[in-house]
Image (cartoon, rainbow, N blue to C red):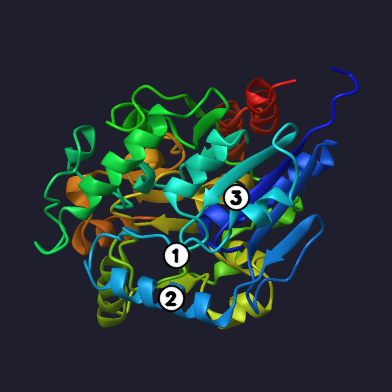
Amino acid sequence: MSNFTWRVVHLSTGHEGGAGLAARRLNSALNNQGVSSTFGALENPRYILGENEFSISRKFWQRLVSGLLTRLQRLVSDKVLFSLVSYNVYKYQQIRKLGNPENTILHFHNWYNLISNKELLRLNRKGYPVVVTLHDERFFTGGCHYTFRCQKFKTDCHACPELPSVINLLPSRNIRSTLNLLEESNSQLAFIAPSQWLKNEALSSLLLKNKRVVFIPNTLGIPTLSEKYINKSSSDTKGVLKIGIASMDKSSYIKGGDITSEIEAEIAGRNLQIEFIYLSQIKIQENSKSKFWDQIDYLLVASRAENSPNVIHEAKHFGIPVIASDIGGISELLDRDYDIAIPEQDLNPIKILEILAGLNNRKQSEAVNAMKESFSKYVGASIEFHKDLYLSILKH
């Protein structure tokens, strides 16, 4: 075993978003610990290659088909995201060039319009050790990213209530075809859930109830900042309470975009001393993401569904209190003595504005250490857990 060399190839449709960001951070952290690891995503003008990263090019007609599929699938529901069909861009011949099945682990983070579920599982059948990180629920629902309260994924998602009748059988067909392939998979297949909540959801599903699903939190992998950054004094805000909104899509229903928009309008109407700072603002992006964290007193996450948001991990790292929906994987991230949990029934503009109106500026540093210690125990040794999982599915 001492002479056995192995490597990991992380694959994601994009380099941005929750999945892309988590994958890049994991790739960087693994390399820092001496693991041979690379990250690849679809070519994009915004994708500036970092160390141990590569881009995946597409032909014009492939981009055209992918774009058309994306637009069509966005039309099927104005509330729930669906990925019912994934275009197979990355072929086996290209993947084979990444390394031999004997010593190369393929770790998929987001594969929409990069590779199909069927092809992903066929790679496992052809001898590749395959790891899939479940950043949402789409793998075991036949395409639905978040199920909310629907429990049909525990059977076969027959006649999906969120889809038009002409296509509401597609999730069920996807599940059936994937189930057949899973039955032929080998022991070199594993799924990672970044939250205990998502692990429990996966293990209760028809598709993954008998598969290996492990809980490993996302790797933070961001530099530690100075104490002045973490312990910003309340005088810096000049009496205005600054609330951070980290969602890049201000109109997203799942992210509660309509809720935050209504709250902001109410703040303006009442002339309250509360300001929303959006991470998506151009001036924030141009002056680095650190400007966002340096300005805010609290992070607000008004999502209707979530797994384990990277932005909450970052807020914990920087000692910033979080006001967030008490749902999904968020619930296990919140420190009840430091953060503020919003019960699901109170996830509306009136209730959240009441919370904001009663806040003081950022909590003092003496409470930060206890929160950080608790969060550190939850996150644990993420890199070590990943390495142990990789080695356990390799045949050598």
Q: Amino acid at mark 2?
A: Val
Residue at image x 70%, y 53%? 39
Of the residues tagged 3 and 2, which is closer to the observer?
2
Residue located farthest toward the left when viewing the structure as drawn: 165
Q: Amino acid at mark 1?
A: Ser
Residue at image x 40%, y 47%? 136
**Residue 79 in the image: x percent, y percent?**
23, 63
Residue marked by disc 1? 247
Helix, strand or loop under label 3: helix
In the image, taking residue 169 as reference, residue 91 lies left or right, namely right
Comparing 263 with 38, the one in front is: 38
- Quadrant holding the C terminus: top right
Disc 3/disc 1 C-alpha distance (Å)? 15 Å
Of the residues tagged 2 and 1, which is closer to the observer?
2
Residue marked by disc 3? 22
Q: Earlier in the sequence, mark 2 or mark 1?
A: 2
Tell me, for residue 220, which label it has, or none.
none
Q: Amino acid at mark 3?
A: Ala
Helix, strand or loop under label 2: helix
**Residue 293 in the image: x percent, y percent?**
60, 61
